[in-house]
C-alpha cells in the first residue's frame, strides 16, 4: 500500500480573496488526479472527502480538494461572473504541482458539482458529480442542466434516494438523456449530504467505502477505454 503525503497551498483567484487547495498524494505521485469541490454550506473537510483523502492515495490516485473563497469570507461569493476565475486558479496550481497528470478527473459535491459542470474543463477525462442539484428543495423549479449536455465525456453521478434537491424520477430521466456518457450510483436512504438517514446494517463508513470503490471503478474504466482507443 502506498504511503500518503499531504500539503496545502494558498491561492488568490480574484480581488483580495484567498482559498486553500489541498493535495493528498501517494508517496510516488500518480498520473491520475481527482479534483473535487464542496457544497455551498460546508467546506472541503467533509467526512466523505476526509475518507477519500486517506483511501485514494493508497490506490495510486492523487486527490485534490479545495475551499471556495466564501468559506472564510462570505463576501467573496462564487457566482457566474467569477467561478471561471476560481477554476482557472485551481487548474494553474494543479498543473504546477502535478505536471505529470495524464488522466484528470474533476467535479464536486452539490454546488461544487454544479460549478464544475459549468466550467467544463477541456483537459478532464471524466467528471464526478456528487449530489448534483436538479431543483430547489420543496419546490420543483428546475436548475439548468444545459452545461451537462455540452460535456460529452464520461460522467459519474452519485445521489441519495432521499435527496430533496434531486427528484429520483427526474434524475433517472437525465441519465437516459445523457446516455452513453452518464453513470449513476443511487444510494438508498441517503440525503443530499450523502448521509444515511437510518443507519441499520450499513454504517456511514460503509457508504464512504462504497462511494470510493465506485469512483475507482469509474476512473479505471475511463482510463482503460482511453488506452484501448489509442492502441
Image (spheres, helix red, strand yellow):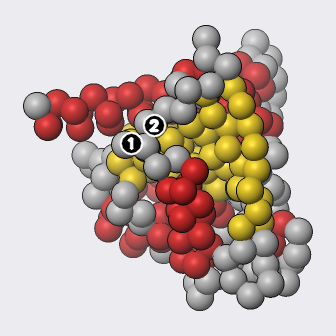
The reply to whether residue 115 is visible in this rendering is no
**Are the residues flagged by discs 1 and 2 in contact, CB closer than 8 Å?**
yes
Name the foreground residue: 220 vs 152.
220
The residue drawn where x is 42% and y is 63% is 121
- Image quadrant containing the N terminus: top right
Label 2: state its secondary structure.
strand
Instruction: Give x and y (percent) for residue 135.
Output: 59, 67
Which of the 4 quarters of the picture holds residue 51? top right
Label 1: state its secondary structure.
strand
The reply to whether residue 108 is visible in this rendering is yes
The residue drawn where x is 82% and y is 57% is 42
Does residue 200 sit above or below 166 in this rendering? above
Q: Gap in Å between the C-alphas at discs 1 and 2?
A: 5 Å
The residue drawn where x is 14% and y is 37% is 229
- Image quadrant containing the C terminus: top left
Instruction: Give x and y (percent) for residue 87.
Output: 56, 68
Which residue is under mark 2? 32
Q: Earlier in the sequence, mark 1 or mark 2?
A: 2
Which residue is under mark 1? 103
Amino acid at each position: 500500500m502506498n504511503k500518503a503525503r499531504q500539503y496545502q497551498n494558498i491561492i488568490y483567484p480574484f480581488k483580495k480573496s484567498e482559498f486553500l487547495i489541498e493535495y493528498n498524494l501517494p508517496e510516488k505521485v500518480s498520473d491520475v488526479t481527482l479534483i473535487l469541490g464542496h457544497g455551498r454550506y460546508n467546506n472541503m473537510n467533509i467526512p466523505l472527502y476526509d475518507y477519500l483523502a486517506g483511501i485514494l492515495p493508497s490506490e495510486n490516485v492523487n486527490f485534490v480538494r479545495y475551499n471556495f473563497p466564501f468559506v472564510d469570507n462570505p463576501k467573496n461569493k462564487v457566482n457566474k461572473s467569477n467561478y471561471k476565475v476560481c477554476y482557472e486558479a485551481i487548474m494553474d496550481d494543479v498543473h504546477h504541482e502535478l505536471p505529470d497528470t495524464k488522466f484528470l478527473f474533476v467535479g464536486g459535491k452539490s454546488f461544487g458539482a454544479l460549478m464544475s459542470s459549468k466550467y467544463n474543463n477541456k483537459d478532464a477525462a471524466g467528471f464526478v458529480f456528487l449530489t448534483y442539484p436538479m431543483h430547489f428543495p420543496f419546490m420543483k423549479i428546475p436548475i439548468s442542466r444545459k452545461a451537462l449536455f455540452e460535456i460529452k465525456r464520461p460522467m459519474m453521478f452519485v445521489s441519495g434516494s432521499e435527496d430533496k434537491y434531486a427528484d429520483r424520477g427526474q434524475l433517472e430521466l437525465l441519465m437516459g438523456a445523457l446516455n452513453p456518457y452518464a453513470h449513476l450510483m443511487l444510494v438508498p436512504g441517503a440525503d443530499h449530504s450523502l448521509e444515511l438517514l437510518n443507519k441499520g446494517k450499513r454504517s456511514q463508513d460503509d457508504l464512504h467505502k462504497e462511494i470510493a470503490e465506485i469512483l475507482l471503478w469509474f476512473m479505471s474504466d475511463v482510463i482503460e477505454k482511453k488506452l484501448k482507443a489509442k492502441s
